[in-house]
């Protein structure tokens, strides 16, 4: 099957600034693909090129089998867009906003009623369809935009920072809807985020920094590539525990946060052996995976927060969004 | 949870698809208008003030020189055009509003031609402005203008044409504007002199030549004059008063026919519309 998104050497320069420095990747149909990186890394610029909003300076991109430069209308017909900034008409009701969209995208009239109900129910806004959008909260507006993005049954849904500016509860609700969506629709999702915990929802992640893709893989593989799980145990006698760990398993352990802490390749498989062979009563055990923060750190050499406060990023972002 | 996968159906973009886009942009304009009572009322205040306050005041001054007609009757067609022009400009200005609030993006990323969106907007502005003008039409009796069906139909058609051209002009202005304040600033700057020089407020006969030249090159003059001629055609006015108040527009001594005037307005509208479309094609 053809790729839902296929990108070759895609580039965008603004004057002398290279916002995107030639990226290559493919997204398979049905996949949830995430672009992870700090603000100003080139995420929005890339997504804007894929959505035909800006023209690339170089390279090529095919979305749903159509070229983003030469077949712009076909691409637009096949994609759904949810932007960072709201694009709803607050003076119209939720239903009127959806109808407007349906007409612009030529949704057949005989399926529109059912489809509208389906997408509104998916984001739990069916009972609010007759309310003016200006009475909606930020989270409701974002949900409505997701519903609208789906209304014309696009093959690829682009979500640019779908949860930015929302409170944690609303964010997890939005993720609930996106997860539901992949089960209910035959759709590929391409999203950008700079929240590490959100990238975990993706099948594969591309880490982007300074306009370049640093690595692409599944969240699990990325975390595995960083290395080992962290195991923490509580015992009656920490010093003997540390000595025994060295003796029995050849592990270097230390006391961190009041617990004996050490790293092993696959923590969950190690725990049974630990209980069997340590020869010391263990009161509690916890195993934690390396986080995507660790992944980002190990690939880019900085944490996402540090990368965002770096010089020049504000300006890059302004360039990327100032259209 | 239902796990039925919804098949993808992608409709073909076509001419009828663009027609749907024109219709829905027009429909939205009307919804916004009907929902916004404040705007409807505020757009009426200015022409009504002009007509009944200024018209009555000035009328008492000039009564002796225009026997047989109320000055407010003279002003009436001018005030119809003023209402239509202000409303049409406001509609066009909502593009700037849409840009500020993001909705313009929703329209511009759709798989339809930009032309369809601009045409929809202009038709919407024209429809809304004509609807607003109907309220002034309803006041005809108060200033001694008869409620003749043929007059009403003629005025409606002329209002629609004028409003379409003005909306196209407004959309062209709005194409590059980033905020409402600058749009209204520029709009005031453009509309006020055009209003004053259009014959909406005072007759264009016997003007000093510099003013006569300005009124002749003012495109609005060609939108106001057909409405005045329509109204005066349904009044019984002495010939010498008609010559003062309803002189028409003359080019090199020849009085232009109404058809030519309307043709000019339509042509200007078409030119403005195509420039506006070109502007929106260029903006990303």
Image: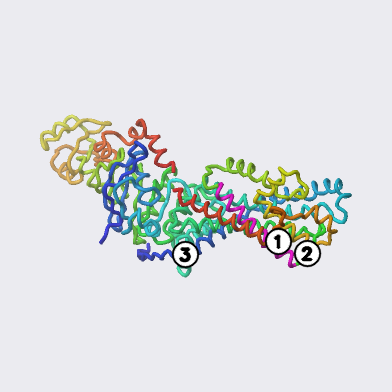
* Residue at the image position 77 percent from the left and 48 percent from the top: B202
- In this figure, which residue is indicated by the disc labeled 2? B147
First in sequence: mark 3 vs mark 2? 3
Instruction: Give, as a single range, the part of the protein colored magenta.
Output: B149-173
Q: Position of residue B8 (x, y in %)?
A: 37, 64
Which residue is found at the position 87% from the left and 50% from the top? B65
Which is nearer the eye, A202 or A38? Answer: A38
Q: Residue at x 27, y 47 (%)?
A: A9
Q: Position of residue A151 (x, y in %)?
A: 44, 60
Residue found at the very far bottom of the displayed protein: A110
Whichever of labels 1 and 2 marks the residue nearer the N terminus, that label is 2
Residue A180 visible in the current orientation: no
Q: Which residue is mark 1?
A: B155
Circle 1 chain: B
On screen, residue A292 versus residue A107, left or right, reads left
- Which secondary structure class fits the magenta region best? helix
């Amino acid at each position: 099957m053809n790729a839902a998104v296929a990108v070759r050497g895609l580039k965008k320069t603004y004057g002398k600034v290279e916002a995107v420095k030639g990226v290559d990747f493919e997204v398979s149909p049905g996949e949830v693909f995430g672009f992870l990186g700090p603000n100003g890394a080139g995420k929005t610029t890339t997504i804007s090129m894929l959505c035909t909003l800006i023209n690339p300076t170089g390279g090529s991109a095919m979305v749903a089998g159509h070229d983003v430069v030469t077949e712009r209308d076909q691409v637009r017909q096949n994609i759904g867009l949810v932007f960072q900034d709201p694009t709803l008409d607050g003076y119209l009701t939720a239903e009127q906003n959806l109808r407007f969209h349906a007409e612009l995208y030529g949704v057949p009239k005989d399926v529109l009623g059912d489809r509208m109900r389906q997408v509104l129910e998916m984001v739990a806004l069916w009972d609010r369809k007759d309310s003016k959008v200006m009475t909606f909260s930020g989270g409701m507006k974002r949900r409505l935009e997701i519903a609208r993005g789906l209304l014309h049954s696009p093959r690829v849904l682009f979500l640019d920072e779908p949860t930015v500016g929302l409170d944690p509860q609303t964010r997890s609700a939005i993720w609930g809807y996106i997860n539901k969506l992949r089960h209910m629709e035959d759709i590929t999702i391409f999203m950008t985020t700079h929240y590490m915990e959100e990238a975990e929802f993706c099948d594969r992640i591309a880490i982007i920094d300074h306009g370049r893709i640093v690595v692409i893989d599944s969240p699990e593989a990325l975390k595995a590539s960083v290395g080992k799980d962290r195991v923490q145990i509580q015992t009656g006698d920490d010093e003997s525990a540390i000595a025994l760990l060295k003796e029995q398993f050849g592990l270097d352990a230390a006391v961190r946060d009041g617990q004996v802490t050490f790293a092993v390749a696959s923590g969950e498989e190690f725990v049974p052996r630990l209980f069997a062979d340590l020869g010391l009563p263990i009161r509690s055990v916890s195993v934690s995976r390396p986080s995507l923060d660790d992944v980002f750190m190990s690939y880019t050499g900085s944490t996402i927060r540090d990368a965002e406060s770096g010089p020049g990023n504000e300006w890059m972002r302004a360039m990327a969004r100032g259209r | 949870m239902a796990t039925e996968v919804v098949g993808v159906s992608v409709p073909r973009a076509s001419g009828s698809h663009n027609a749907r886009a024109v219709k829905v942009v027009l429909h939205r304009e009307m919804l916004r208008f009907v929902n916004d009572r404040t705007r409807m009322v505020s757009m009426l205040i200015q022409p009504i003030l002009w007509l009944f306050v200024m018209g009555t005041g000035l009328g008492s001054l000039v009564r002796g020189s225009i026997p047989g007609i109320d000055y407010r009757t003279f002003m009436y067609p001018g005030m119809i055009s003023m209402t239509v022009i202000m409303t049409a400009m406001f509609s066009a200005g909502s593009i700037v509003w849409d840009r500020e609030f993001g909705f313009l993006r929703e329209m511009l990323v759709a798989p339809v031609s930009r032309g369809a969106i601009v045409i929809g907007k202009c038709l919407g502005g024209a429809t809304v402005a004509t609807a607003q003008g109907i309220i002034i039409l309803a006041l005809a009796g108060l200033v001694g203008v008869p409620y003749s069906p043929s007059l009403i139909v003629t005025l409606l058609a002329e209002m629609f044409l004028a409003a379409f051209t003005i909306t196209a002009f407004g959309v062209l202005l709005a194409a590059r504007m980033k905020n409402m304040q600058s749009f209204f600033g520029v709009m005031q700057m453009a509309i006020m002199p055009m209003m004053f020089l259009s014959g909406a407020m005072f007759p264009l006969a016997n003007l000093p030549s510099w003013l006569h030249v300005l009124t002749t090159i003012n495109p609005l003059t060609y939108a106001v004059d057909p409405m005045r001629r329509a109204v005066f055609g349904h009044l019984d006015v002495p010939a010498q008063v008609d010559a003062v108040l309803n002189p028409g527009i003359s080019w090199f001594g020849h009085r232009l026919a109404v058809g030519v005037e309307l043709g000019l307005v339509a042509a200007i509208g078409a030119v403005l519309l195509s420039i506006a479309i070109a502007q929106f094609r260029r903006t990303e």
